[in-house]
Structure formats: structure tokens, C-alpha cells
Image: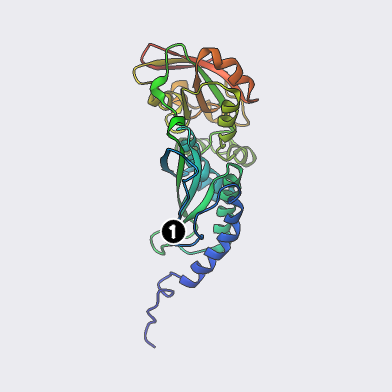
Amino acid sequence: MSEEFTYKSAGVDIKEAAELVGDINQLRQRTEGNRKLMQSFGLFAATYDLSGYKEPVIMTGCDGVGTKLEILLEFDQLEIAGKDLVAMNVNDILTTGGDPLMFLDYVGVGRIDKTKIKRLIAGMSEHLESCNCILAGGETAEMPGVVPDGMIELSGFAVGACEKSNLIDPTSVEVGDVLIGYESDGFHANGWSLIRKILKAFPGEVTDEELSGLLAPTRLYHDAVESLRSSGAKIRAMAHITGGGLPENLERLLGDKGAAISVPKWELGAVQKILQHIEEQEAFNTFNMGWGWVAIVPSEDAEKAVAAHPRAKTIGEVTDSGEVLVQTA
């Protein structure tokens, strides 16, 4: 009998993929609350009506989950992977002063497993619903022989908009301005290559239960932004603290200025079991060290900015030193 040459026999099931789109639509509908797509979901591209803005400025971003994904797959935490993917992108949009409008995902697999992919999308949808951002579409690529069975490739893409007059301008930062930090929920989706190296070097030091606790999803900081806006504080700049930690991410905003930052020792679950193996400066250059979001406001607005959010704290001020100096209080 001659060999059958069909797409399905080569490892790609178009029918299964088409059915998955319908399943995904049921999950993503929850993300269309106050905002809706201009046209139907499932077309070749997504559209959004910007006529509600007088002078709209568009901002975009893309990111992934990094090597945290390997441990999330090991612990079967697919929903967290979906949340991480959304937050890593949406938070970047928020730093500009923009409203996160639409999110798209890319999922690459060796073979479609509808249950697993739907769990990923469910996590995405939950985070997107909470920040009023639409899951506008994406791509599920079945790539047998390229993506190993059991592995998943993940990327996310976000689109936002705001009025030109509301765009955050980091060049307005002045010496003497105050840095307001907002607590993170853990390591988020950064630094996991180093964490994995430590876990391998010291097997059993962190229990599975403790490690599961360290896998908390990347926090969305839309609530921090809303609290700043409602407080009436002038927002000079905002930073999402990801790879590079507090120093590198704040340097992006400060130009030739610097900052002096002092934060308390990060005591959260088993975090210190990881950090004890790392020099302090290396830790500050890798992890968020307990502060996933930083806003810069004039000194006269610092008190009301902190009072507007229960997880906000003054952590430093802008200086003329030209470098970001961070230490444990």
C-alpha cells in the first residue's frame, strides 16, 4: 500500500485547528466588555474603532514568558502562563499612559492539544477581562518535528491608545522627584534561567510546594495606574520592572539623571532561598526585588500617590548623579 500524503499524515490537523478557533471564541468573548472589536472575531485581521479619541496615539509591544514556561509546564500551570503572557505585554502599554485595547497571542505546538490550549487562553482571558483589554485574535501553529511534543512556544502582542495630551513624557522628570514603588507578587516572568540554574545546583533546597508558590503570575498594574490618576498626582513617568531589575528599567526613563533607591529586604515565601545564592547587586540587576512597578511623581504629590493604593510605598528619589543606586534598607 502506498504511503498517504495528506497534511494530517504530516502531523497537521486543519480540522482540529478550525474547531479550536470556535472553542477559543467562547473564552475570548468575556474580554469584550466595555470595549468591542469593530468587526467580527475570526477575520484575517482585527479592527478597533478609534473615533472616541480626539487625537489618538497608538502604542504597541510584544513579549513572552521566557524560561519560566518550562517550570510552568512541569507543574501543569498553563493558566498562569497565559496570565504571565498578558501581563508582560499589557504592563508595558500602561507605562506610556495608554489604554490597553487589544491583545494577540502566538502559540506554537508540536501537536494540537485542545484542552491545554484552551487552558492557556482561559488564563489570558481572565487577565484581559480584568484590565478591559480585548483578546482580538492570534495564531496557533502546529509544527510537528520543530516544536517537541509537550513543549509550547508563547508570544504576545498588545496594542494600546491614548489621547496625545495624556501621553506620559519621561523627559519631564526632574531632580527631586519621588519614586513610588508598587509591590510585585513574586519573580514574575523574569530571571528564571538563573532561578532554574540555582534549583539544579541545590536540589531539594526549595520544596515543590515552595516552588509552586514562587510561580505566581505576573501582576497587572492597571490598578496602580488608576489609583495614580484618581489621586490627582502628576505622573512624570512609569516603569514596568522586568529583566534588568530596578536599575536598568529606571535608567530608560532618567536620561542623564540618576536615582537613589532603598527598599526593604524581600521577604516573600521561598524567595530568600533563591536570593541567598546571589550577590546583592546581581539580584537587583536581575529581579524586581519585590517592586514590579515604579511611578515617578513630583515630591509634592508623593503623599497622595502613596495614600491612593494599599501596596504603594516611597522607595527613592531622582538625583543628578547620572546612575541608579539601589540598596536594601
Question: Does residue 97 sit above or below 81 in this rendering?
Answer: above
In the rendered view, tell whether residue 23 sits above or below residue 319: below
Q: Where's residue 235, x and y in %?
A: 50, 23
Residue closer to the observer: 174 or 149: 174
Can you give x and y, in whole percent of width and height, for residue 11 in the image? 43, 70
Is 165 situated above or below 7?
above
Quarter of the figure that contains the C terminus: top right
Q: Is residue 77 visible?
A: no
Q: Residue at x 36, y 15 (%)?
A: 322
Q: Residue at x 41, y 26 (%)?
A: 169
Disc 1 packing (10 Å; few <14; some 14–19; many ≥20): few
Residue on which disc 1 sits = 148
In depth, the one of 79 and 316 nearer the eye is: 316
Q: Residue at x 44, y 58 (%)?
A: 148
**Is 164 placed left or right of 264 in the picture?**
left
Q: Secondary structure at mark 1?
A: loop
Q: What's the residue type where badge 1 is placed?
A: Pro
Q: Which residue is nearer to you in this view: 234 or 326?
A: 234
Task: Residue 213: tell me if it is visible.
Answer: yes
| Placement of the N terminus among the 4 image quadrants | bottom left
Depth check: give the residue in front, 183 or 228. Answer: 228
In percent of width and height, residue 130 lies at 61, 43
Q: Residue 271: which quarter of the image? A: top right
Is 30 positioned to the left or the right of 237 in the image?
Answer: right
Residue 237 percent location from the top left of the image: 46, 25
